[in-house]
Each structure stands twice: as C-alpha cells, then as structure tokens.
Image (cartoon, helix red, strand yellow):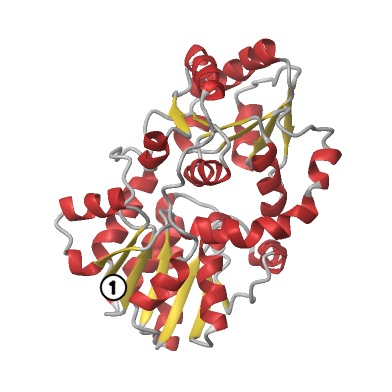
C-alpha cells in the first residue's frame, strides 16, 4: 500500500506528525506533499526538522490568494503528483483549502480518501472552514472521527457507519510526543520575563474576527479590561494577518498587552502549558488547552469542538468586551480536573490500522 500525506499549514503538520512518524516506524510506503498554503516550504523546513520529521517529497509553493485562486492552484498541482505517484490512499487533515483540494483531486482520480479529524461541525456555513470540512467528509472513504460527537454528526448526514472510525484526535498523540521535546524551550518564559501562571495568552486569526474592524476592536477593548482587572501581562501571539489588520484599522494595543510574532510550536506549547488562561479563536488551541488542563475562553459564538465545553475546559464568549471579562472570571473559578475527551494518544496507530496497512 502506498499512502499520500497531503498538508499545507502548521496545524496540519502538527496533527499529521504522529501519523508520519508511525508510517516511518513500520516502514510503510508513503510520501508527503506540502502545498505551501501558509508559508513557503523553505520556511517550513525548520518546523519539520524541529519535529524530527522527514522532508516533504513535493512542494507546490502555492502561497496566499483568494479561496478560489489558492484551491485552483492546489488542485492542479496535487493532481499532477497523484497521477505520477498513483497512491492507494490520500490522507488529509482538518478543514483548510489544502484539505478541500486534496480530497477533491483524489476523489476525481478514483483514489481513496482518508479524512483525519472528520465530523467536526460548527453548523456555521459562513465559515470557509465549515464548507471545507463538510465537502471533504462527503468525498472521503475513511472518516477518522476524533470523538463520538463527531461520529454522530457524520451519521446524521447519511454517511455509512462502515466508513466511520472513532480513533481519538492526533493532537493528543502530538502533545504527548512533543511536550517532552518542548521542555528544552522553557526559556521562552524567561525571554519574555514571564512567571508560570502569571500571564494570559491570546491568539486571534480567524477571518470573521480579524477582518471585521468592529470585532477586532472589541477584542482589543476586552483585553484592555482584562489588564485593568487582573494587572498581569497579556501576551498576544499575533498571526501576520492580525498584525496587518491592526495597522489597517489603526487599532493601537494599549499598555499591558504585548504583541509577539507567533513562536515556534514547541515554544508555543510551553506558553500554553504555563499560562493562567488562554483566549483564542483557534480550534486547535481549544483542544490543546483542554489536554494541558489550562482554562480556555473562545472568542467565537460557536465551536466545532463542543466536547471542550461539555467537559468544562472552555467557554464561548464571542468578542463583546463585557462577555470576555465575565468568561475569564468564570473559567478562573473552574476546577482543572476535567477529563480529556480526545483519546488516549494512540490515534495514529488506529488510523493506519483502519486503512488495512
């Protein structure tokens, strides 16, 4: 069996890393195709090396663009590689344009598709990610649902139970595998002058938040209120898109909110693990904080990770400043003894086994 692993963003690399390691460990025939959706592969190579992963075999260098431009370029490039390599199965992960293009290219060529992290639903079609994940699921032959909730979403959409495998989430595998390596990056706290549980960590990158001047301004005002209330540093790990929008909208970050470029994954793990609380609009960060037992406040009105709400590790507040303040107050009073709903850290092994490899 030959397997194609298609990825294009750092979250995909992180969540596919346990599968790549396992495929390598059992000497299965596979190749990695990197679309370059967020960064050029040359920028990503350091990331691959940091996670001790083999280099990608193909690099499309697609770069940024509109959804149509990006997806079209990927479709063209992925199809060329698949026609040349003729894999038996294509694996995609998550909800990016890379996932959409990879699943569509493979399905049209009659190649089986495995969707890692299938069945997640925000039930909000205004989110591009929701469209990508729904389409990918309905093109897939193997649907690797991380939880029973995700499985139920797929069954309700008429997908056969024979094609659904509840495997847990590879984010747990990745955290278990990488948290030890990340201990060597603990100096990130010293470098930023931070104490354990002595700061709030913030990330915001989603289109519906950062491309909307009113919502982005509300987030900043909410952070200002937090600093006034708690008087501890607020570390804002800002995606380039967010930094550009702050400048475009002429929004100035008040004193006490420190903006930093997104650190490496291992450094970010340490910032997450040692934060008093994390505020985010990222789905992956909602999962990671849940596993690390760090309270999370999500700057959205919905989530495709409802399990985090159910176990008590996370709360949805949107971007209203008063709701942000109230949400933080509620989560800081929460006990951190919730149960991790995302599996036992053996998702990669279960996924490869389900392929019959």
Between 44 and 22, the residue placed more toward the observer is 22
- Residue 93 in the image: state x and y as whole percent: 43, 61
Looking at the rendered structure, the secondary structure element under dot 1 is helix
Q: Quadrant of the N terminus?
A: bottom left
Q: Residue 144, located in which quarter of the rendered image?
A: bottom left
Above or below, 61 relative to 153: below
Picture coordinates of residue 153, whole percent (x, y): 23, 49
- 86 displayed left or right of 284: left
* Horizontal side of residue 53 vs 138, given as left or right: right
Q: Nearer the viewer, residue 237 or 289?
A: 289
Report the side of 85 relative to 141 (left or right): right
Instruction: State the residue in front, 48 or 100.
Output: 48
* CA neighbours of label 1 inside 10 A, class few (<14), some (14 to 19), many (20+): some
Q: In which quarter of the view is residue 79 placed?
A: bottom left
Q: Is residue 203 above or below residue 332?
A: below
> Position of 327 compared to 223: left or right?
left
Q: Residue at x 50, y 15 (%)?
A: 326
The residue under label 1 is: 107
Q: Residue at x 44, y 87 (%)?
A: 85
From the image, which quarter does the C terminus lie in? Answer: bottom left
Q: Is residue 246 above or below residue 158?
A: above
Q: Is residue 136 above or below residue 232?
A: below
Residue beneath the point at 56% across and 23% down: 332
Q: Residue at x 50, y 35 (%)?
A: 281
Quadrant of the image occupied by residue 200: top right
Q: Total label count?
A: 1
Q: Position of residue 247 (x, y in %)?
A: 66, 28
């Amino acid at each position: 069996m030959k397997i194609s692993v298609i990825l294009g963003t750092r979250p995909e690399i992180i969540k596919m890393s346990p599968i790549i390691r396992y495929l390598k460990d059992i000497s299965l025939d596979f190749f990695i195709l990197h679309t370059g959706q967020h960064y050029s592969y040359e920028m990503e190579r350091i990331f691959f090396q940091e996670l001790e992963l083999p280099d990608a075999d193909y690099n499309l260098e697609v770069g940024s663009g509109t959804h149509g431009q990006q997806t079209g370029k990927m479709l063209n490039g992925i199809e060329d590689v698949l026609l040349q390599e003729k894999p038996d199965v294509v694996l995609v992960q998550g909800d990016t344009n890379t996932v959409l293009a990879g699943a569509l290219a493979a399905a049209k060529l009659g190649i089986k598709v495995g969707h890692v992290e299938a069945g997640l639903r925000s039930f909000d079609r205004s989110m591009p990610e929701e469209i990508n994940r729904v389409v990918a699921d309905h093109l897939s032959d193997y649907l690797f649902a991380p939880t029973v909730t995700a499985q139920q979403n797929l069954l309700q959409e008429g997908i056969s139970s024979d094609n659904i495998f509840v495997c847990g989430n590879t984010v747990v595998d990745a955290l278990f595998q990488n948290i030890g390596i990340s201990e060597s990056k603990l100096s990130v706290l010293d470098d930023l002058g931070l104490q354990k549980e002595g700061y709030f960590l913030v990330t915001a990158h989603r289109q519906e938040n950062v491309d909307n001047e009113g919502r982005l301004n509300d987030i900043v005002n909410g952070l200002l209120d937090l600093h006034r209330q708690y008087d501890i540093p607020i570390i804002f790990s800002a995606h380039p898109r967010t930094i550009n929008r702050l400048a475009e909208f002429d929004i100035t970050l008040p004193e006490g909110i420190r903006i930093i470029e997104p650190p490496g994954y291992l450094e970010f793990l340490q910032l997450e693990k040692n934060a008093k609380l994390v505020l985010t609009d990222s789905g992956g960060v909602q999962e990671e904080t849940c596993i690390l037992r760090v309270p999370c406040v999500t700057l959205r009105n919905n989530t495709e990770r409802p399990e985090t709400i159910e176990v008590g590790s996370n709360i949805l507040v949107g971007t209203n400043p008063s709701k942000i303040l109230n949400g933080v107050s509620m989560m800081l009073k929460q006990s951190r003894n919730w149960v991790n709903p995302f599996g036992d850290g053996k998702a990669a092994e279960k996924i490869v086994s389900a392929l019959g490899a």
